[in-house]
Structures are given as structure tokens and as C-alpha cells.
Image (spheres, rainbow, N blue to C red):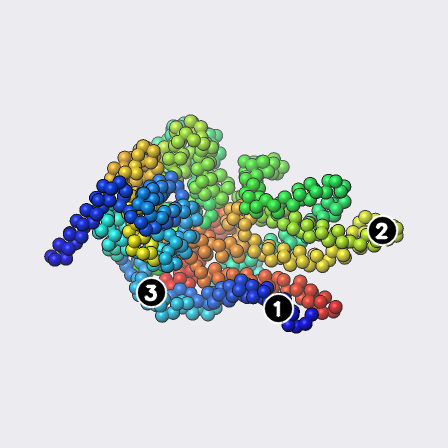
Amino acid sequence: MKMMKTALLGSAIATLVTTAAWADGHGCGVEGGRLSIIGNEFPAIQTVARNAVECAESGSAEASANLTADHQTLNVAGMTGNPAEYTTAIVANSSIVALINEDVIRPLDDLVAEYGQDIPAQQLITVNGQVMAVAFMANSQNLVYRADVLEQIGMDVPTSYEQVLEAAEKIRAEGIMENPVGGAYAAGWNLAQEFTNMYLGTGGQFFEPGTANVTINNENGVEALEMMKALTEYMNPDYLTHDSNATSAEWEAGNVALMNMWGSRTNVLMDSEGSTPEVYENTMTSGPLTVGDSGRPANTLWWDGWTVAKNISDEDAAATFLAMKAGVSPDILNDETMTEAVWLMPNFESSPVNTGVLASVAAGSTPYPMVPFQGLLHTALGDNIADFLQGNESAEQTLADIEAAYTAAAKEQGFLQ
Amino acid sequence: MKHSSFIWFVLPSVVLMILFIALPIVSVVMQSLYTEHEQVIVTVENCGPFGCVEAQSVDQEATQALRDAQPLGKFAGTSVYRDRNHLAVDEVAAAWEASGSYREFWGTLMNLPFYGAMAFTLTYTAIVTPMTIILGFFVAIAVNSVARSLRGPTIFFSLLPMIVTPLVGALILFWMVDARGILGTALQWLANDPSLSVKASTPLMWIMLMFYGTWSSIPFAFIVYYAGLQTVNTDTLEAAMIDGASRWERIRYVIVPHLAPLTTFIALIQLMDNFRVFEPIISFQAQAHARSLSIAIFTDLGGETRLLSSAAATSVLTIVFVAILLMPVLVRTWREFDTK
């Protein structure tokens, strides 16, 4: 009871302090310290970083942000030193795992108790009961389609990959487009992500429960690979070099009518830049597709959130926490930033751009697995699937290769004996 | 030169070489012999915006204790070298036992990542190195016979492939050979096959990479040979002319022997460079068709979970193979030195 009282008193004082800071015009409560952000680069993250840096600078803290597509190769190295170069990393549910494995981010419970009582519980990412990150947006890959083309062939919006194939065949047969299907199938991370989606859609599971033993060489794995190959028959022959950027460019050029694409990128496809009205006015997005008869959505749910480095002083940690909290506060949402993502803040209002991601959440899509060895499997998938798609070997051989490559890597990392 | 002055003369470079070449190699070799500790895995509940799920996580305290006890990691000997992602000793032995024919064995071997990467790397080195030397030589001969007033601009244009940043040069070519690019469309027209795509075909991609590799390193051979050409003894050339030697005979019997030591030098540098082929594969996004040892190191380090020991082992193997490749050239140079 005494502890309870002390805690209450503590937070009451904290609230007072915060209110005082608000009152004297600093706005976000930062007083000195250091903020250094490392994160991926897309509009929503740029908005968050801009607001966080603004807050930190208003509180006379040192502030900088390094937003780059290569953030994954920099964040662990940049947070390992003491003091860490980066005081916060903006991560997703896949990339937070590497930071937890390397033990470079700190639990946020004490900071949340002191400064973050008003952060909604659904934004807190907890691992084993400890808050490790604060999420600010949701993301997923969903069907993006051209309403005019589907109307022309007289088909409804596909809800399964089988229907996508049927529609693609019709579009090709009627001579509307030569390669109507798109997808980020570039060998490497993108291709592995597409397999992850498809494999989950078949109802498969990646590992024996509770262990690091991989189990993808089965009927589900073959089904997923076969479906991917069937889709590639309707793709631009260069699909193995097409990442999300190249696929989006194909879409904007009007060469593609159906594709599985990230929710965070649909805003770009639907705006009037870089395309003709025929394309962007007819670009629509719907929920996740299914494959086969498992009934499970063939996609994964993602969140993006921020963390705080372990090897920094308490002052820097507090400054970082407050600045990042301000960076993702409900106040950052305005007409311009609202459509950049599916924000998790309570005052978020959805628009047609976000239909896909919200439909995925509603459909109960699986979150991308947050297990320490998933990244190793992802790399093994990305290295090997192209062999099958190019017709060099059987699906079973490809799956066996993936399992063997993963097992060797997992042994080296100490996940398997 | 006195021994003491010789030692003082080379000391700075010896110190720098130990600091920046020898020590890093030692650390890489060490790294390749150790692996991560056994990870203590616990099942935990993860909660987030999409609800709670049971998942595995690394038990930090238990793992930290292991790390403190043995900071270098777990000693693994040569096990990383022998595993499937490197030399794959067991897999190769098993394939040898199981295969009915050399063809079948070769197929299994090429399916292993290390040998697949070696096949491309060696083919690339074997083709690009001589092509660079031969074409670089002819460019040098041609530039050398251009009128003096035009020589400056000609040299500049011949050096362009080397001046252009490799990544940018490769990207430009990558867009040009796209099925909708100018070269890609020209190829389709030439082959009379509208579905032809360089990026989708492994053989065409290999040719493309080697073409790019040759194009980008010709200027190096050219400039070395061009410098060499300025030192050819004109008396010998004139004597050969008076004896009635044709232009071709003068090149064959006077210029080529004169430039032979330079060829050794270019071959050494090019063998090393080509064996470490990297940028073209990245900028042509050719990982699906061609892999090299450098690409393997890059993917080991660039994944969400960094495979340091694996990358270190591949680096050591690269050094070993470069040494083997250079051996004939080095032995030859040594012999020449010895006979003098």
C-alpha cells in the first residue's frame, strides 16, 4: 500500500513537472540531453523524426536524425558503443528482434511510469511483460487493383490469389495488358517477404512450437511456392529485379492491374504525381488475399515504433523518451500527415488510402513473427527461392535448401546445437 | 644500401602494413574460428497493437553470463568453414557417394551456395582479366597513333569508364538493358524475340556482368600500357621498319616484349579485383542469377541478424583463393628476380 502511495505521488509530481514544462512554452518537457534517431526513410517516419527533433531543440537538447533505407545495418553497430551513437532506433516488428538479441535497447517501464502515463496501452510493445518500444503506425501488404480494368473484364475485386490468376488470364486474353500482375519479387528480402505472406496464408507454421527447428519443407511450403510461380507467369519477366520502388513505378506507368503492395506506399500510388488520371483515379485497395482453402489471410501485420538505447545516460534517455513521445503525439496529425500511414494515435481518421491495412487488422492477419531466429530464415528464403521460380529445381529441393541454409546459420548463431 | 638505413627506410610502410593489413586479417581469422554462444531461449508473451502472442526470446541475463565468461564466443574450430554455407564438406562427400554421374554431382555441387558463387567468380575472373588486358592494349596502341593534337581528348574519353563512379555506370547500363530500355529493345529487335529480357535470363545476365566488368576496367590497362608505350625505344622501331617489318610485326616483336612486365602487373591487379567482383552484381540486381564471395559476405552482414563468423570465414576463404590465383604470377616474378 505504501508502495502504491509512493508510486501515485511520484506520478503526480511527474505530471506537475510535465505541466510546468508545458506552461513555460517548451511544449514537450525536454530539458537538455541528447536525441539521435536512426530509422528507415518514408513519409510517416520523416514526420515523426521532424516533430521529435523540433521538440528536442525547443528544449535545448542536442538533436539529429539519420533516416536511411540502410538503417538495419547501422542501428546495432551504432547502439553497441557506450555511450551509444544513436539514442533511439525506429524499428518494425522484424527489426526490433536484432536489437533485443544484442541487448542494446532498454526496457521503458520506468520512463513510461514517469513521463508516459498518457500513451495509450495499445501503442506499448511489451516483451515478457516489459515495455520495449512504443508503436505509432500499422502496416501490411494488401491487394491494390485497377477498378477500370476489373470493370472492363467484368470481374469483382478478387479476394483470393486463385481469383487474381483468373482475372490476370482474362486481362491478358483480352489484350488489355501483357503482364497484369505486379509484386515486389526482387531476390532477397522482398522475395522472402512474399513467401512469408503466402506460407502463412496456406496455414503453415515456420518452426516446431517452442524450438528453433524449421519446418517449411511440407505441403504448405510447396503450395506457397507453386502459387508464387503461377503469379510470376503474369508478371514482367524482370520480376526478380523489381523491389517495392520498381513495382510502384510499373504501377504508375499503367502496366499492372493487380498487385500485393505495402499500405504505406498506396498514398504515393493514389496521388496525382508521377502518373496519369486513368491510373491514379482507378487505383483502389482492398483487404488481404487468401490462398487455397485455409481461409487465413496471406499477409502479415507490421507495426513501426521507437525504442530507447541502453548505453546512454539517464538524462539522454529521458530527453529521448520525451522527444519521441512528442514526435508521435496526437498533435502531429493534420490534413497533410493524416494519410501518410495508419497511425495508432487515438485521433487518427482513416481515408481510402488506408482501407487495405485496416481490413487486414479486421481480418485477423498474423503479425510478422517476433522470434529471434526469424531473420535468419528470412535471409535463407531470400537467397534460395529464385532458383525455384527460374525453374532450376523442384519446390521440394528449394525448400530443403532453405532449411539447410537456415540450420547452418542458426547453429553458428547458437540457436540450434 | 646499408642494412640499418634499409630498415629505417621501410619501417614506416612495415608498421602501416602491420596495423592496417596484418592485424585486421588476424582478427578476421580469429572471428571465423569462434561462433556465438548457445542462446538461452525462453518463451515469453509479446503484446502490441495486434494483441498478444506467445513467442521465443533470448534470455539476456543468462546469455550475458555466458558472454562475460568467454567474450570471444564459443570456440568452434573449423566448423564454420566446413558447414553447408561454406565448404560444405559433408554435403560434398555425400553428393559424391550418391551421384551416379559427374553431371549429377556437378548439379548438386552448383546448388551449394559456396560452389555456386565460386563458379561465377572464377568464370568472371577468367574472362574479364584477359579481355581487359587485350582490349586495353589495343586501345593504347590506337590512342598512341592518333595525331598529337587530338590525343588529349581521346585519352579523356578512353578514361571515362573509370572516371564514372562504378555504381552509376552500372545503373545506367542496367536501365538501358531493361526490356523497355534502348539496348533491351534493340536486342529484342535483333533477336526477333519480343519476350527477350536480359534481366530474366541467367546466361545473358552473366554476359552483361562480364561486359560491364571489362568495359569498366579497360581504362586501367589502357593507361598503364599507354605509359609503357612512351618508353619504347624508337631506334629499335626504326631499325625494324628499315628491315621491312610491317606494323603488325613491329607490335608483335618489339612492343609486346617491351610491355611484358607491365602485363604481369596488370594481371596481378585485375585478378585480385575481379575475384572480389561486387558492385556490378549489386547495381544490376543480379543476385538471383549470379553470386560471388563478396556478395555472400555482404548478405551475411546485411541481414537482420548479422552472421559475423560466417562473413569472417568467407573473407578468409577469399584471401586464400586470391593467394592461390596469384601464385603462378608471383612464382614467375620471383624466378625472374632470382635469375637476375
How far across and how far down the image is residue A367, in percent?
Answer: 31, 48
Amino acid type, mark 3 = Gln
Mark 1, other Cα within 10 Å: few <14 / some 14–19 / many ≥20: few
Q: Quadrant of residue B308?
A: bottom left
**Residue on which the image places disc 1:** B8
Mark 2, other Cα within 10 Å: few <14 / some 14–19 / many ≥20: few
Foreground mark, 3 or 1, reads 1
How far across and how far down the image is residue A17, in percent?
Answer: 21, 47
How far across and how far down the image is residue B115, in percent?
Answer: 53, 59
Q: Secondary structure at mark 3?
A: helix
Looking at the image, which is closer to me, B156 or B112? Answer: B156
**Residue on which the image places disc 3:** B64
Query: Of all residues shown, which one is farthest toward the left?
Result: A1
Q: Chain of mark 1?
A: B
Quarter of the image with the N terminus of chain B in it: bottom right
Q: Quadrant of residue B176?
A: top right
Residue B238's tag is 2
